[in-house]
Amino acid sequence: ILLSGGDIALAGAIKGKVLCKGLRDSRDAVVYLENVPGQFPAPKQPAEIDQVKMVFIPHVLPVLVGTAVKFLNSDPVLHNVYTPSKAGDRFNLGTWPKGQSKSYTFDKAGEVRLLCNVHPEMEAWVVVLSNPYFAKTAPDGSYSIANVPAGKYSLKVWHEKLKFPPQE
């Protein structure tokens, strides 16, 4: 992954582009700041991941610690959501039919790999972050993090297949 244009604008926005070499595009990387001081309450509304045509939508979901995620099943078959990841406490929500949903609250920072034990080809990621200063890249790799408080931070990039060194 190459990061370019990490300009810090006077308005407090960090914008740039992540290039995922060797992949068809640069979507689904999560760009985030580390060590931002403060308390950041989780959103009251849950985030959502749907299961449509045997695929988790979205494939990557960045959230703030304490965020509840509602898992929907829009397929005409049974689905399950579980994780082997420590950051997700290795939860297993069981199996449920079309039109129903189950929720889980992500209380620990880290990457959480989601799987369906009914359909082993299904996989998604929840990236749980300690502050709200993050963005998911567009297909062209562009991102923007708004309202960043003044300070010196470490800018990091998470991607399910690639590694990237942090930048100050």
Image (tube, rainbow, N blue to C red):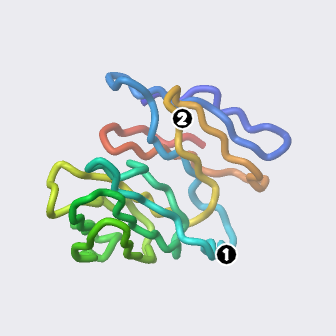
Q: x and y percent of residue 41 in the render?
A: 65, 76
> Is residue 117 positioned above or below 11 on the image?
below
- Mark on residue 118? none
Query: As rendered, which of 98 and 129 lies closer to the eye?
Result: 98
Amino acid type for the residue under numbered disc 1:
Gln
Query: As rendered, which of 151 and 33 lies closer to the eye?
Result: 33
| Earlier residue among tags 2 and 1 | 1
Quadrant in which residue 107 is drawn: bottom left
> Is residue 164 positioned above or below 98 on the image?
above
> Most extreme residue toward the right, as rendered?
10
User: Badge 1: how crowded within 10 Å, few (<14), some, or many (20+)?
Assistant: few
**Which residue has dot 2 on it?**
138
**Which residue has dot 1 on it?**
39
Q: x and y percent of residue 79 in the render?
A: 24, 64
Mark pair 2, 1: CA separation: 28 Å
Residue at the image position 24 percent from the left and 75 percent from the top: 92
Q: Number of marks in the image?
A: 2
Amino acid type for the residue under numbered disc 2:
Ala
Q: In this view, does 85 lie to the left or right of 110?
A: left
Residue at the image position 33 percent from the left and 45 percent from the top: 160
